[in-house]
Amino acid sequence: MKKIVILISGRGSNMQAIVQASQKEQWPAQIVAVISNKADAAGLQFAQSQGIPTQVVESKGLTREVFDQNLQQVIDQCQADLVVLAGFMRILTPAFVQHYQNRIINIHPSLLPSFVGLHTHQQALDAGVKLHGATVHFVTAELDHGPIIDQACIRVLSDDTEQSLAQRLLEKEHLIYPRAVRLFIEDKLEVQGDRVLIKADTSQF
């Protein structure tokens, strides 16, 4: 049974979706910890309500290198097979990412490789795109890059705002992120260079 650690910085709505999917679908995995760099992260309370151990690794006042070393130590104590970033608002060091190569995934609110960084919904509106979306990908040292596992998109409406786009897209995120995690724990993902191949038909998901 694979062990999952989820990292959050806020409410962790994607974390909640993953937890709920794992319970409903009875995954062959255990979410062994939800870790935050902020003690007041609302998602910690949800995790605790589900009986999931939580931990805070403070980042304030620390260099990126020292914080990542502290975080890595905590994750490794959990013997994590997969590290899931769910609204974890930290740029991770190359050494940290390398340590978990092909075992750390993230969800980004755009159709990568478009609109990296912050304010992706406003970036999409400013660019005038007709489709906007979200991407689940393996994390690499390059920000918001890495082999793509899954994507979903929505149509951009003429009256959309940054807030309305974000809200509608979140529903898609809550579908594709649990699906991607399940594919990983069932050993159905194979990384070949910059591409992710899915080993079996996933129509049942």
Image (cartoon, helix red, strand yellow):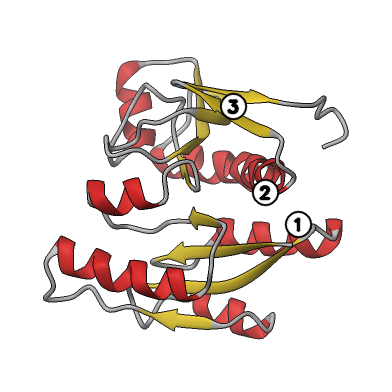
Q: Which of marks 3 and 1 is nearer the N terminus?
A: 1
Q: How far apart are marks 3 and 1 (CA)?
A: 22 Å
Circle 3 is placed at which residue position? 154
Q: In this view, does 128 lie above or below 85?
A: above
Mark 1–mark 2 Cα distance, whole angstroms, equals 6 Å
Select label 3 or label 1 by which is in front.
1
Q: In which quarter of the image is the N terminus?
A: bottom right
Q: Looking at the image, do the residues carrying marks 3 and 1 touch, with CB atoms under 8 Å apart?
A: no
Callouts 3 and 2 close, C-beta under 8 Å: no
Q: For this rendering, which residue is in front, 112 or 155?
A: 112
Distance CA(mark 3)–CA(mark 2): 18 Å
Please tell me in which quadrant of the rendered image residue 9 appears: bottom left
Does 21 appear above or below 140?
below
Q: Which amino acid does label 1 sit on?
A: Ala
Q: Label 2: which residue?
A: 178
Residue 195 in the image: state x and y as whole percent: 51, 20
Q: Which amino acid does label 3 sit on?
A: Ile
Helix, strand or loop status at disc 1: helix
Q: Where is residue 8 in the image (x, y as percent from the top left)?
A: 44, 65
At x 64%, y 68%, the residue is 31
Q: How many labels does the image show?
A: 3
Q: Residues within 10 Å of mark 1 (few under 14, many from 20)?
A: some
Q: Name the residue carrying label 1.
A: 21
Residue found at x 65% / y 43% = 184
The percent coordinates of residue 51 (x first, y second) are 68, 84
Q: Which is more foreground, mark 3 or mark 2?
A: 2
For label 2, the crowd category at 10 Å Cα-Cα, with few meaning under 14, some 14 to 19 and many 20 or more, is many
Badge 3: few (under 14), some or many (20 or more) residues near its Cα, within 10 Å? some
Residue at disc 2, secondary structure: helix
- Element on which disc 3 rests: strand
- Give, as a three-letter code, the residue at label 2: Pro
Task: Evaluate if marks 1 and 2 touch, with contact meaning CB atoms under 8 Å apart.
Answer: yes
